[in-house]
Image: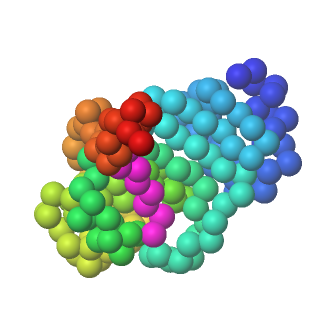
Amino acid sequence: MPKLGVKNIISDWPSESRANAQHIINKYGEPDEATPSRLIWHNNGPWKHTIVYRDTVKHNFPFPHSDGIEQAVSHEIPMEKACELVAFNGSLVFCCTRGEISACCQSEEANLLSINLAHDIILDKKTFEQARRFFCDSIIAYRQNRKVPYMEELQFTPDSASADADECAISEEFLTGSAH
């Protein structure tokens, strides 16, 4: 993507969104894709993809802020964990078919924290209540310039074989047209 094109795209974005975009550009270079409403990087750093949105979403957990940076990793999502993950953080998005979980928050550090805690919930290392408390404590520590490993890097290796194509539930005869 030509630099001038990206600068033109984000020039009329709200200041917070422009700052988010510039921060990610400074870290990962020019995006692989750009539209008037989002910039997208593929396979940048530990991420399967990163999306910076022009239009942010207000989010009050753990404090009022705007979610505008979404980052995803490959990860198996057991269906029985879906409710716990949503109860932990409503800004988590997962797609079992793609084997992907993403977090959308105000910073990459907060996304790392969310995804690392989602991993802990999936592995039964933390309940969603424990994860919410850990999240709050970590944000406070980070804002006090204390070291927070869960906000520095993924605490696990993403599993690229995490996609789940599910099972065919319609008979082969029906699909081939041989069933009447």
Q: Quadrant of the C terminus?
A: top left
Q: Residue at x 32, y 42 (%)?
A: 171
Q: Quadrant of the N terminus?
A: top right
User: From which residue to which does the magenta span run?
Assistant: 90-100
Q: Is residue 4 magenta?
A: no
Say if residue 96 shows up in the picture: yes
The image's colour scheme reads rainbow
Q: Residue at x 75, y 21 (%)?
A: 2
Residue 107 image position (x, y, % from top left): 51, 54
Q: Is residue 54 left or right of residue 106?
A: right
Q: Which of these two is toward me, 99 or 172?
A: 172
Q: Residue at x 79, y 42 (%)?
A: 36
Q: Which of these two is toward me, 172 or 96?
A: 172
Say if residue 98 shows up in the picture: no
Residue 145 image position (x, y, % from top left): 39, 60
Q: Is residue 98 magenta?
A: yes
- Quarter of the image for residue 57 reads bottom right
Q: Residue at x 34, y 54 (%)?
A: 115
- Quarter of the image for residue 117 reads bottom left
Residue 109 image position (x, y, % from top left): 43, 52
Q: Which residue occupies the extreme front position in the image?
A: 180
Numbered disc total? 0
Residue 26 image position (x, y, % from top left): 60, 34
Q: Which residue occupies the extreme top position in the image?
A: 2
172 relative to 83, above or below: above
Q: Is residue 155 left or right of residue 115?
A: left
167 relative to 105, above or below: above
